[in-house]
Amino acid sequence: MNAFVIGILVGLAAVLVVAGIKKWRTRDKPMSVAEKADYLSKRRARMLPALAIIFLSQQATFISQMSGEHVSAEKAKISAWLVLSVVLLFGIATKGFWLEPKEVRDLIDDENTQANRNEAMRWGFLFAMASAIGVYVLTMIESVTGREAVHIVLSFGIAAALLRWGILEKRAHANA
Amino acid sequence: MPERLANRLKERRTELGLTQAELAERVGVTRKTVNTVENGVFTPSATLAIKLAKALQLSVEELFWIER
């Protein structure tokens, strides 16, 4: 099987495992809609910065091998990264918590969360643009393929948005 | 001098014996949003300001004012 397809399948499997674990962890906790929204919102605030750091540190392998020939295992990692990027991007762009009931999702994405999410997306956009400029300058001294450029821009954009959102959410929960 | 939206949310909420969670439930937001408005971290929309004022039995002008 093609290494890229394997990577995509591994990425999808990882996303399903994480979603399953999250669902399993809250199985025996009877909570009202408001309590559940508060619980999930706090968990998200803790999770986002960690997720951003893990996501960005994973790119170290790719960046260190830039301009080199990617072996099959690396190709699989790249497509797994693509799946993770798409999932994270959807998480930032939508309310997230797709497996939760609609009323919980609506409450989690209340006015303050929307403002924080918009601010995070603004940061993501600015970082993506800044890294695009960085890549443009890099092409003047080193050859960079289209795939590598997209990888860098996407990684920095998503990581910046996740990190900013996490910081804003943590700040919002402080002294609560 | 920058302007900021000050409020007496906490004072009024305490007067009525409400917790942040209870007030949040009344206006249909999370406790986090009530907390950020109370602490002046987040400026609420007109809609939320009206809902908060109604839940705390005050007018918007009594609950919020501009501080210079």
Image (cartoon, grey):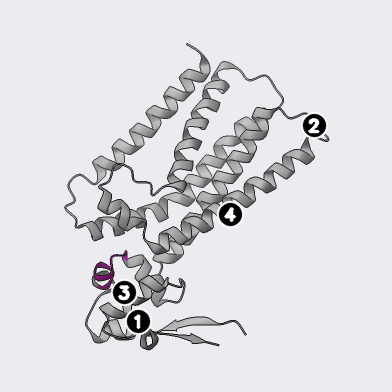
Marks 3/1 in contact by CB < 8 Å: the verdict is no
Q: Which residues are magenta?
A: B23-30
Discs 4 and 1 carry the same chain letter: no
At label 1, which amino acid type do we have? Leu
Q: Which mark's residue is nearer the viewer, 4 or 2?
A: 4
Q: Are marks 4 and 2 on the same chain?
A: yes
Circle 1 SS class: helix
Residue topped by disc 2 = A142
Residue located 40% across and 63% down the image: A111
How many angstroms separate mark 2 from mark 3 (CA)?
57 Å
Amino acid type, mark 3: Lys
Q: Position of residue A156 (x, y in %)?
A: 60, 44
Nearer the observer, disc 2 or disc 3? 3
The answer to whether A124 appears left or right of B11 in the picture is right
Instruction: Please say if the residues under marks 1 and 2 sit with CB atoms less than 8 Å apart.
Output: no
Residue B3, placed above or below residue A169: below
Tell which subunit mark 3 falls on.
Answer: B
Q: Which residue is mark 4?
A: A123
Q: Give the farthest residue toward the right.
A: A141
Q: Do the residues indicated by labels 1 and 2 lie within the same chain of the protein?
A: no
Residue A161 visible within the image: yes
Residue B9, percent from left and from top: 35, 81
Residue visible at 47% across and 45% down in the picture: A51
User: Under tag 2, what secondary structure?
Assistant: loop
Front in this rendered view, residue A176 or A116: A116
* Residue B28: in magenta span: yes
Q: CA distance from mark 3 to mark 1?
A: 12 Å
Say if the magenta span includes residue B11: no
